[in-house]
Amino acid sequence: MSQPKPSSSLGALLRQYMPSYLAGALMLAAFQLSMNRIDWLSKQAIDAIFSSQAGQSAGAAVRPALWMLVLAVAAFFTRVASRFFCFNAGRDIEYSLRQRLLDSLHRLGMAFYRKMPAGEIMSRATNDLTQVRLLTGFGVMNLINVVFAVASALQVMSGISLRLTVASLVVFPLVMFSTKLFSASMFQRTRKNQETLGRLTEVVQGNLAGVRVIKSFGLQSAEERRFAAVNREYQEASLALARLRGMMIPVVGSAAAIGVLTFFAYGSALLLRGPSQGGISEGDFFAFSLALNRMTWPMVALGFLLSILQRGRVSFARLNEVFDAQPEVKDGPITPEKPLSGALRVRDLSFAYGDRKVLDGVSFSLQTGESLAIVGRTGSGKTTLAMLLARLLPTPEKAVFLDEQDVCSLKLSAVRGVVGYAQQDAFLFSTTVARNIGFMLRDPDSAESLEKIKQAAQSAQIYNELQDLPDKLDTIVGERGVQLSGGQKQRTALARALLWQPRLLILDDPLSAVDAKTEAAILDALRGHIGEPAHDGDRSLLLITHRVAAAARCQRILVLDHGRVVESGTHQQLLQLGGIYAGFAREQQRARELEELGQSDAPESLPTLSVGGQP
Ligand SMILES: Nc1ncnc2c1ncn2[C@@H]1O[C@H](COP(=O)(O)OP(=O)(O)OP(=O)(O)O)[C@@H](O)[C@H]1O
Ligand SMILES: [Mg+2]
């Protein structure tokens, strides 16, 4: 995880690949030089034919024709080589930008993702990156080519007749002017088009991720309408762009055609006059038309090229918005000399989301080898606290210490290396169960890894259920684990956390979706993990839970209420205190008794119980 590099300008990026572009430019120069020689040789051959006696003509044209053949082969190879160098540079730039994009996305935190939805990011990662590649490959190559093509053609044309050259090129400023006119609105329409595509992708993404919710709430038609509106917007933006592009080619093309027309009119007059009368020869006429043709296409294509450059620039700016975004969690400067033990001290920690204070003066400590439960009503700030400890939120300075060092001054990689946070919403990747559990392992498919994965699955009480799946541990769980039940998902994520074995493991409500019996079994297994001596010291556990039964297994318990620590002590101490925790214990005891009754008696016996009090 690295600090953000300042975003480079497009120019700086291109300069990095200068050698490739220079090689490409050299090849393009060689290509245009070959074409230039071919023009002159064709003049030579045609003039030879016209000026010689019948019967000798073929002989006089053979030498230039052979040279033309050689040059045509050279032109072919240099053209291919120029594409190779320039396009490869474009691909390399695309590759490095894509890597940088992922690096940035890893670095950025929730503040960024709130502002930039996933669809928008995906559109930048695909669409915008393609546009930048087009600019840095195809665009740059053609830009260089235009310069050489014009120089090489002008050399032929002006060498034949300066007057004819001026006459044929008189309209080219018009060509330039018309492309310039188009460029401003091309820029705007392109940006609008890319923005609407981003919004469209966003809606699709939301629909895919929430397909179950949409179906179960019967929201299909509302979603279809919402989609239709964005879809229409995108269509209109695309059409506006297409209209402009469609107009540009004919307008610019006709301007160029006027140049060709002028050449034919004035050129044929000069041809009829002949070289002896200040006119031109047949060879001149032919070579001139070749050169003019060679120059016309790149000039007409300038308009097209311009739009590629515009789009590439817009896209590069959009990518820079991601590269330049500042992560809210800043990396610290210190790499600890020896690995951290994971001893945690929290001192007067307060935290607010904007103006909303959710943690207020929280203090506690957790020695290595200890277990601590954090209990509290929903919304009391437990997850926020856990995320601050793992530095997933901007932790305030001088509030959280690992081995007596402020976490804010430590390298993020060092903190995350010892503090493992298993988040509340079990997230599964769309791969096999085994790979999900062994996510942290370097080689999750090896036999050794498989053994660890099995053990973790057993500790999390999911192993037996996994045996019933079609491919057991190799079953693909589907997008975000749709093929598993809520409880299975949760325990798969728990197995992943148990296998991870960081020095300080924070489990955020890992048992909310399991029944009491499974919970007890998991807690028994968990005891093996808490305080289990690692090769270099003990492990500790911070268990966030709503369940008193789970908290009771921990050595100490902290009760959080409205962001404050209101009670702390052992299970017994807190029961005797008769406060919030004792209240939880009573509520849950009652719920368990009801559950047990519900299991042992037929459901219809319950009303009898409540009315008559008889079982
Ligand atoms: N990203 C956020 N932006 C703004 N407010 C937030 C954010 N995340 C949480 N909150 C608010 O902070 C408070 C504490 O939330 P937190 O998730 O820490 O509670 P919790 O104790 O983990 O609750 P639960 O037991 O339901 O998981 C809540 O009132 C919540 O609405
Ligand atoms: Mg929570």
Image (cartoon, helix red, strand yellow):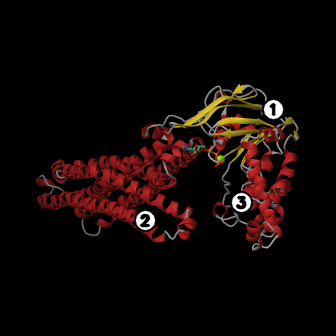
Residue 156 vs 564, above or below: the answer is: below
Residue 144 vs 401, above or below: the answer is: below
The kind of residue on which mark 2 rests is: Phe
Indicate the secondary structure of the residue bearing disc 1.
loop
Mark 3 vs 2: CB contact within 8 A: no
Point out residue 11 in the picture as x, y percentages from the top left corner: 42, 38
Point out residue 186 in the picture as x, y percentages from the top left corner: 30, 53
Residue 367 - label: 1
Point out residue 274 in the picture as x, y percentages from the top left corner: 14, 58
The kind of residue on which mark 3 rests is: Lys
In space, the residues marked 2 and 1 are separated at their CA atoms by: 53 Å
- Left or right: 15 as drawn, with respect to 445: left
Residue 422 vs 227, above or below: the answer is: above
In space, the residues marked 1 and 3 are separated at their CA atoms by: 31 Å
Q: Earlier in the sequence, mark 2 or mark 1?
A: 2
Identify the residue at horizontal 24%, vertical 48% (top origin). Answer: 159
* Mark 3 lies on residue: 489
- Left or right: 179 as drawn, with respect to 16: left
Identify the residue at horizontal 80%, vertical 44% (top origin). Answer: 501
* Mark 2 lies on residue: 227
For the N terminus, the image quarter is top right
Mark 2 vs 1: CB contact within 8 A: no
